[in-house]
Image: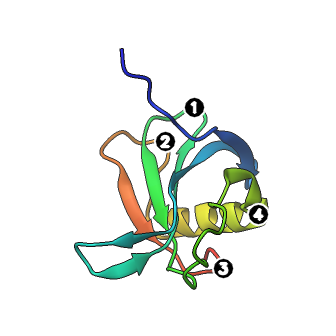
Amino acid sequence: MARTKQSPEFEIEVDGEPYVWRLQRQPQWSSDAADWRGMAIAVRHKEGQREAVLEFPPGRQPRYGAPQLQSSQIAPDLVAKAIASAIVAGWEPQSRGKTVAIVVDATGG
């Protein structure tokens, strides 16, 4: 049986509601768009099913051989602001349905 490697999940509270998030995608080079892509985090309400993937803009490219971004290096304030922005943008975390992709700015807004 193949073993999948998933990022650990972290709990965070936004506006009194509990959410769970994980690093969905590392910043990486995209061959289809021929461009650098930023990180993405997957978020869901702790008691809900519907996920949102919050995509951040690409920062500057890391140096060759630099260590990869770790989930623990992402600031909780950035995640909380991005979740709040996703809700304002129309994500309904308690509803059912497909995963929603939402693009946020570098500050999570």
Q: Could you classify mark 4 by the number of other residues whose Cα lies within 10 Å: few (under 14), some (14-19), or many (20 or more)?
A: few
Task: Name the residue at 64% across, 44% down.
Answer: 19
Give residue 94's mark: 2
Instruction: Give the residue furthest to the front.
Output: 65
Q: What element carries label 3?
A: loop
* Tag nearer the camera, 3 or 1: 3
| Residue marked by disc 4 | 75
Quadrant in the picture for the N terminus: top left
Q: What element carries label 1?
A: loop
| Residue marked by disc 3 | 107
CA–CA distance in space, label 2 to label 4: 25 Å
Mark 1 near mark 2, Cβ–Cβ under 8 Å? yes
Quadrant in the picture for the C terminus: bottom right
Mark 4 near mark 1, Cβ–Cβ under 8 Å? no
Corner quadrant of residue 82: bottom right
Q: Position of residue 99 (x, y in %)?
A: 35, 49
Q: Is mark 4 on a helix, strand or loop?
A: loop
Is residue 9 shown above or below 64? Answer: above
| Residue marked by disc 1 | 47
Mark 3 near mark 1, Cβ–Cβ under 8 Å? no
> How many labels, in total?
4
